Each structure stands twice: as C-alpha cells, then as structure tokens.
Amino acid sequence: MEDGASLDDLLRAALSSLFAGNASAAKHHINLIAMGAVVALERQARREDGLLLPAADWNLLVSLCIQIGDLGRAETLIKSQFSLPKIKLEIDPEVGDERFRFENRNNEINIFLNPTCLNLTGWLIVYRTAEIFPMIAFLFKNVTRPIRVKFSVGDHGVGGELSFSSDSQNSVLVPDSYFVGRNAYENERRHFAARRIAWADRSTTVFWRGSTTGRRSAGWRSLPRIQLCQIAKDNPHLAMDFGINQVVQIDYVEEEADINAAGLTKPFVHSNNFDAYRYHIDIDGNSNSWPGLFIKLLSGGAVLKVDSQHGYRQWYYSQLVPWVHYIPIAADMSDLIEKVQWVTSHDDEACRIGQAGRGLALRMTLGSEARRMVDTVAAAIQSGVLT
C-alpha cells in the first residue's frame, strides 16, 4: 500500500470518495487495497460455531467493490473467503428494491442484485448483503438441493422470501444483518459479563432511548415513539426516562424544530450502559428494533415490550414467551402506566423475567441460529413457501 497508508485509511478514503460522487477515486483506493490487503483480511477471518467470520473490514471492502461495479473482484473475495466452488454476481433489473435473489445450480452460486446496488441509494442494502455472507455460505453448504430464493434485506420483509423482519405470515424469517455482522453481539456479551452489575445496584427507572423512526398516521405526534415519550413527560411522578436521541426521517425543518422544542429529546446513551437499568422499554421503529431488543435481553434487564402495531416479528420471536421473557404492553400503549407500576412494584418477578430473557439471548449464538436457519429454509422449501 502507498505512502504508509493503513488498510483502514484506504477503506475510509474509498468510502468517502464514493459518497462524494467520485467513483474514480474510490476505484483508485480499492485498487491500492487489492495490492496488499486482501490476503491480510483473509488471515483475520476466524471459524466459530461452524461458520467462517470475516473481519469487519472485509464486509466494507466487498460492499465497496460492488458499489463501484467491480463485481469480478467482489466474486474473488467472496469465493476465497468462504471456500466456495464458484460464485457469480449479476445485475438484474427484475430483482426488486431492497432485495437480492440467489440460486445454487451446477455447483455454482449465483447472486442477482438490483441495479440500485451500483449507486449510493443502494449502499445500505449492499452492506447488509455483505454482512450476511457467512449465513449464505453456510446455507449453501448445508442445503444440497438446488434452490432459487429471494432475500429481502430491507426493514420490511416480503411474503415468500427470506426476511430479517416481516409482518407477512409466509415470510421465512432469518437472523438479521446486525446479529450476523456483530457475531450475535459478541462485544455486548463480553462487556455485560465482565461488568456483572447486580440487580440491586441497577437503576429502578424504566428506560428507553431511540430515534424518530416508524410509521405515522398524521403529523409527527402520531409516531408511536413520540407518543411513548409524551406519556413519560405527562407522568413525571413515575420513574420513566424515555427520550428521542436522534431526529431522523423527518421531511420538514419545521417539524424537526417542533420535536426539539417539545421537550421529548434526551442525550444518547450507549447500549453498553443498558445493564445499569432494571427495566427497559422495547418499541418498533420502521419495523422491529433489531439490535435494540436483543441487547436489552442480553443486559439482563426486564423488558416491557410494546406489541408491534403492524405485526412485525423476527426469527426468534416464536421463542419469546410473555411474562416469562418479557412483559407485554398493548400496541396502543393504553396499559403502559399499569405495566410500569406493576414492574416497579413486583421487583422479584421482574428480576426473574430479566434473567430468563438474558438466558434465552445467551443461548442464541451465530452457530445455533445458522443451524436453525438451515432447518427453517429446508422446511419452507418442503412446504412450497420457497422454491
């Protein structure tokens, strides 16, 4: 690599060039990376629970290669990383937005991408696709029959497709890209285990932070997360610390100003500090709160989960039992105050629920969920949900 630049420097430079609209500069930086960094990235990969986990920089490099249209280099990186027989990336206008299609045929994996993957609007989709390659590789090595599957990597899954989160009853739910890319939240597991904050030493305040994602029926005040924060503001006598820490997906400057002026915003609190609280709220954003709920369960706090207004669920929701792993709250939050009062006055029961939720989350490793995914996909093929 040139001028002593590190791999991280070149990756960030390539990403910055891409987002600045300078594709030629991005290609230049990626070419420099390919001269010396690919082997280094491959050596950083590690095996765990039967899966090969690339270094985080590998995900970024592959997604950048796809973004600049260098599909051949991306194919080489994927094939060598996962010891796959042959892989082919293709652009297909018939593939829907926020999804891709993959097939295994004649000992070859074909992945078809939407054309938006070659411009900035498709950046998140490309990166999520790169993050879940460990699962894709594991699936192809363990499902021997030929399959042709659509994969929805957006916030909203689609019926008859592999999806991270969906309100469709015939979506085939699989682990999301955050769970895979962060190795089942390995850092949070280690962090909480090292801190071991006792229940008695945790705050008795019911806690929530999040952004203004979600569906609204009218103005910004109809956003469920805004309504959640308004309930806390209207009931200052109860120990509820709810706050918007980031205003996003708001089209008008005036609305953003109104939200900031409404007294509903609060400072960001890192998820590493979730174990400082006994009680947590979980509430949907655009769909389910992918890392939010899982990390809250890992923290050992009792989770008060607001039912999804639109019926969204993730791959492990069938294992969640109300009053065992979490405290249910109605989708319209009409019983929120009642449940907050219950949890703060039934501390022993809340502690047991927190411990049960943590135990469930700890049992879900990347390997266990990869094996579950293989069984899920095989069953969906057998039943005709997937072809």
Image (cartoon, helix red, strand yellow):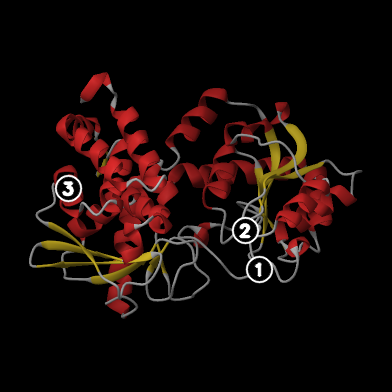
Instruction: Measure the C-alpha gap from mark 1 to mark 2.
Output: 8 Å
Counting residues from the start of the chain, the first of labels 1 and 2 encountered is 2
* Residue 175 appears anywhere in the view: no
Q: Dots 1 and 2: beta carbons under 8 Å? A: yes
Give percent across and percent down for residue 364: 43, 47
Disc marking residue 284: 2
Counting residues from the start of the chain, the first of labels 3 and 2 encountered is 3
Question: Looking at the image, is 387 positioned above or below residue 37?
Answer: below
Question: Looking at the image, is 88 positioned above or below residue 134?
Answer: below
Q: Dots 3 and 2: beta carbons under 8 Å? A: no
Of the pair 63 and 166, the residue shown nearer to us: 63
Circle 3 sits on which residue? 73
Q: Dots 1 and 3: beta carbons under 8 Å? A: no
Instruction: Measure the C-alpha gap from mark 3 to mark 2.
Output: 38 Å
Q: Secondary structure at mark 3?
A: helix
Q: Quadrant of the C terminus?
A: bottom left
Q: Amino acid at mark 1?
A: Gln
* Residue 140 appears anywhere in the view: yes
Give percent across and percent down for residue 141: 18, 56
Circle 1 sits on which residue? 309
Left or right: 189 as drawn, with respect to 61: right
Give percent across and percent down for residue 272: 57, 32
Q: Crowding at label 3, few (<14), some or many (≥20) Cα neighbours within 10 Å?
A: some
Instruction: Measure the C-alpha gap from mark 1 to mark 3.
Output: 43 Å
Residue found at x 24% / y 53%: 138
Left or right: 150 as drawn, with respect to 84: right
Q: Quadrant of residue 61?
A: top left
Q: Nearer the viewer, mark 1 or mark 3?
A: 3
